[in-house]
Every structure is written in C-alpha cells, then in structure tokens.
Amino acid sequence: MSNSSSITQFLLLAFTDTRELQLLHFWLFLGIYLAALLGNVLIITTIACDQHLHTPMYFFLLNLSLLDLGSISITVPKSMANSLWDTRVISYAGCAAQVFFVFFLFGAEYSLLTIMSYDRYIAICKPLHYGTLLGSRACLHMAAAAWVSGFLNALLHTANTFSLPLCKGNALDHFFCEIPQILKLSCSDTYLRELGLIVFSVCLISVCFVFIVLSYVQIFRAVLRIPSEQGRHKAFSTCLPHLAVVSLFVSTGAFAYLKPPSISSPSLDLVVSVLYSLVPPALNPLIYSMRNQELKGAVWKQITGFLLKL
C-alpha cells in the first residue's frame, strides 16, 4: 500500500509492447502533431499579420488556434517520447501539470466556442448592432473571460484531485494523466468531493451547450428568411465551420466521458481519448480554411510571401 506522499511518478498506459508498433505510434503521432502545429501556426500568423482579418470572428479564431496548439502540445509529445524510449513513466509533477493544462485549455476552448456562437448570432441576427456589441474592448473581455474561467476551473480540479490520498498503485489506464483515472487510485471517500466538482462542471458545460443550440436555432431561422440564395449561402458559410468544430469537440468529448460503463474497455477508452485529444486540434485549422475563402486566400498569401523571401 502506498499513499500520494510516497508516489513520485505515475505509469501511463502503453499503446503496445511491440517495438515496431511503438515506433509506428511515434511516427503517426509525430505526423498528426506536425500537421496540427503547422495548421494552427499558419492561422495565428495569418490573422495577426493581415489587417483585413482584424475582426471579432478572426480574433476569436486566433484564440481558438492558440488553445488547440497548447492542448495538443500538452499530451502528444510526452506520449511520443515514451514510445520512442520504450517507457511509461511520467513524474508526479509532470502528471499534475498535464491535468492542470488539459482542464485549463479544453475548458477555455469550450467557453470560447460558446462565445463564438454568440459572435455568429450577433453577426447574422443583429448585424446593425455588431460593431456596438462586439467592439474591440468587448472582444478582449470575452476572450479573457474564456481563458480565466478555464484557468480557475483547472486550478480547482487539480488542487482537489492531488490532495486526495492515493493507495491503489500508480498505474493509469490512459496515455496521459486524467482526473477520472487518478480518482481510481484513491483510497478515501473524499474522492466524492471531486466527483461533486465534476458534476458542477458538467452542469456548466450543459448550460453552454444549450446556449450554443439556442443561438443556432435563431441563426438558422434568420438565414432561412433571407430572400436570395446567394445571401443564405454566404451566411451559412460563416457558420458551418464553427458548427462543425463544436460538433467535433462536443461529440468526441461527450462519448469519452458519458459512454455507458457496459461498453467501456481499455482499448476503446484509448481510441476515444486519442479522438478527443488529437483530432479536434488537428482538424480545426483545416475545417476553417476549407470553408472560409477569405481566410484561405490570406493563408495562401502568407505562404507565397514566405516562399518568395527564401
């Protein structure tokens, strides 16, 4: 038996024990990570450098890319390093840092996606008030609120989780540190306190989800009242990328945390965790650049400008 004070490291779940498959996992994750890195850095650089993109929608998209870049950088490099060096170890401090930043970045991202739905609602349903309701100061305050809410939520959960006594070993059934897996190692009834915090967080997430749904109900009603087909297509084209990103983020996260215990297994949990931690950060830049001609043109301009300088 051991407790949390004597635990100096945790053991993460290995994808495989076969050396060839470990190297395959390393190269596969490296490809996904580099794609996410390239896509998000391109969007951040393009929006920051192009004056035409200094609007609320692209300001929030820049913040989304920063969060995606951070979230995939917290989990993937460590997993890649473990496969490359054939180890499962993560330090106690490193595990706590992973838990904090995963909660921080994913929580802030969900808050930001909620704010982005409000941005689309104002742009389509109240276009005459867009400049007033979403001025530069209002955008800064909303983005800051998303980051601060994620930070406070992560601080609360991390401090509470790592104050619990752990006496059921140090092996986690996950490829990165996650609170539900750490709670399984707890030997005290005080873990119910953390479960209460998780329920509270789920309630907040549900409120945000309802807000997003109601926003899009109003958006679709307004778009369908637009008389010209070209106008409807233009309005939909500004909403569909955000709607696709929200759907991807919510569906993968909801399945990971709300799937019935009867279908849960280590292999399925591993696949699902890969989906919600890797797929959204890698696909979000592609989703936005594919559907947004203005952004696509600006990104291509940045790329060609960079190549001409070489």
Image (tube, rainbow, N blue to C red):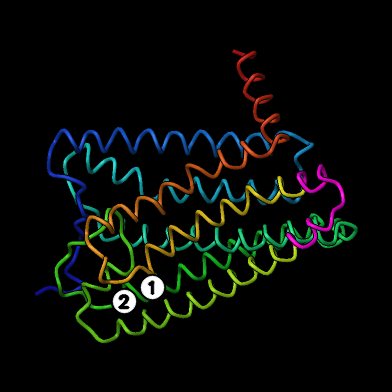
**Measured from the top left, where is residue 176 in percent x and y?**
30, 55
Give the crowd class for mark 1: few <14, some 14-19, many >=20 residues within 10 Å: some
In 3D space, how far apart are the residues under numbered discs 1 and 2 (Cα atoms)? Answer: 6 Å
* Residue found farthest to the bottom: 189
Who is closer to the viewer here, 148 or 83? Answer: 83
**Measured from the top left, where is residue 283 in percent x and y?**
50, 42
- Above or below residue 122? Residue 35 is above
Residue position marked by numbered label 2 in the rendering: 163
Who is closer to the viewer here, 213 or 279? Answer: 213
Secondary structure of the residue carrying tag 1 is: helix
**Measured from the top left, where is residue 172 in percent x and y?**
22, 61
Three-letter amino acid code of the residue under disc 1: Ala
* Residue found farthest to the right: 128
Q: In this view, does 102 lie to the left or right of 41?
A: left
Tell me which corner region of the image, top left, top right, bottom left or bottom right, holds residue 188. Answer: bottom left
- Above or below residue 294? Residue 176 is below
Circles 1 and 2 in contact, beta carbons < 8 Å? yes
Q: Is residue 129 left or right of residue 297?
A: right
Who is closer to the viewer here, 292 or 135? Answer: 292
Q: What segment carries the magenta color?
A: 219-234
- Above or below residue 22? Residue 219 is below
Residue position marked by numbered label 1 in the rendering: 159
Three-letter amino acid code of the residue under disc 2: Ser
**Measured from the top left, where is residue 52 in percent x and y?**
79, 37
At a point 68% along the width and 39% down the height, the residue shown is: 292
At a point 37% along the width and 59% down the height, the residue shown is: 97
Tell me which corner region of the image, top left, top right, bottom left or bottom right, holds residue 116. Answer: bottom right
Q: Is the magenta stretch mostly helix, strand or loop?
A: helix
In the picture, the quarter occupied by the N terminus is bottom left
Secondary structure of the residue carrying tag 2 is: loop
At a point 64% along the width and 65% down the height, the residue shown is: 212
